[in-house]
Image: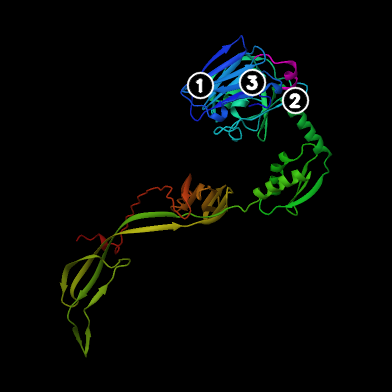
Amino acid sequence: SRKGGGTVVIEANSPLTFRTRENKDSNQLVVDIPNSRLPDRLKRPYITKDFNQQISSINAYQDSGSTTARVVIQFRVATRATVTQSGKRLLVFPVGPVNAGNKDRVLDDSAEIDTIARVAAAEGSPTDPRILPDSSTELGDASRFFGRPISIEVRDTSVRDVIQLIAEQSGANIVLAGGVDGNISLKLKQIPWDQALLIVMKSQGLGYVRQGSVLRISPLKNLRDESEAARQILEAQRAAEPLKVKIIPVSYAKVADLVDRVKPFLTKTRGEAVADIRTSSIIITDTPEIIERVSGLIRSLDTPPLQVLIEGKVVEAREGFTRSFGVNWGASGAQTSLGGGRSINNNLQIASANVNTPNVSYQVRLGTFDIFGDLDANLALAESENLAKVVSAPRVSALNNEPAVIEQTLSTFINKQTIVAGVATNSFEKLDTKLQLAVTPQVTGEGNVIMDLTILREFVSGVPTGTAPAPIESRNAKTKVMVRNGETAVIGGVYQSDVIESEAGVPYLRNLPI
């Protein structure tokens, strides 16, 4: 119970039922607890009149053979009392007027604070860090509470007494500051005690500050004034603190960028950060505490950037269909004697120009000559399908979030003729074609690489005609892809079918019918 004996706590080994009745003539409150057994060591009167408060004595007894235990609480004067149940406990709390001596001692406004004693609580302990955060000058609408359930029913009762009752039931250490006054009526059944306390504080415009295991409750205006005063004191202390200078070397980041990032963390009126580009350092002027904090920030930001090696493969596949025709002329026959031991070899082969070895050949006999032998011709027919690949593989290394470009340019000069006043002038015009890979990589936390890619390939696709230059074709892809480290992504392609027909043979003879 409270140090003055103001609250009576009746505790059982299981949840209990009870009945109460008041004896106004003798200023007594009788609490009957049926189906219970009172230990012999508790069957005696407790005299509390020397404590100078409402309760003068407590007498607990149980008649022989009875199953009802009885507790009689004797008050000094006519007093209203509240009996609440919390789990296995009954709490009897006097809410009537108190005498002058007790009022000066309990929750003394002139001293501004008075600590309310604790009652042990098995669960929902007030030391639980989840119950009532460290400070709250503005009470929000919390949705979760962790205190032990309690029940309270009072009518037009002092806020101080209600908070005292919550402290008794929860076991919390509560300090009440001056200005906590007013009356309140409420009826709460089995709700967490921290929720009940917040309800009372919000209804009366109160706030709290938690310092360790102690809750200090005060009007919100006072707490705001205290917070502002503490801030001004802290600023005055910082203003009087001597300044120091520290030079912090920077290895990887840009010095100017780091200076912009650390300036918001410096003291507004006294702190300064200067970038020294030549030595790649930052000069910090501020208090030792701020310098230490900014130094840690710079160490966290000045880290080696990630580097990515990117290789792009540009593959162009052409399917070409070619057909060639040709005639191989020849003659064969026995040797012809000319006399004098001389003769003519009648075997003669004449190969047509630019005729490859035929895949299919046909023998055609054209005629017979007595001198030259048999004249014949081999008609060569060739047909094939060739698959050609043009592969370009640009490769470039880039830092994380930094653009990189690699480019190869091929220059072609073409003859250009200009006629002015009947005079022809020849000049050369430069025609550039290029292969370009532009990429900006971004390395994710999971090790993937996001790339903004631009791939361009230009090439000459023909020959100049007249005054027109040679046509230039290009293949261009621009996209954003994500790949894993070491993997390859196919970003797209264009299919183009070119058919080329050519004919080769001996002039005039190639048109002879077969």
Most foreground residue, 49 or 399: 49
- Mark 1 crowd level (few <14, some 14–19, many ≥20, 10 Å Cα): few
Mark closer to the chain start, 2 or 3: 3
Q: Amino acid at mark 3?
A: Ser
Asked if the residue at tag 3 contacts the one at tag 2, i.e. Cβ–Cβ closer than 8 Å, the answer is no
**Is residue 202 or residue 378 the one in the foreground?**
202
Distance of label 2 from label 3 (alpha carbons): 45 Å
**Residue at mark 1:** 63
- Residue 184, numbered label: none
Q: Residue at x 39, y 58 (%)?
A: 389
Secondary structure beneath label 2: helix
Q: Which residue is mark 3?
A: 57
- Asked if residue 346 lies in the magenta stretch, the reply is no
**In the structure shown, which secondary structural element does the residue marked by tag 1 occupy?**
loop
x%, y% of residue 155? Answer: 60, 13
Image quarter where the C terminus lies is: bottom left
| Amino acid at the residue labelled 1 | Asp
* First in residue order: circle 3 vs circle 1: 3
| Residue 111 pos. (x, y %) | 77, 24
Q: Nearer the viewer, residue 480 or 105?
A: 105
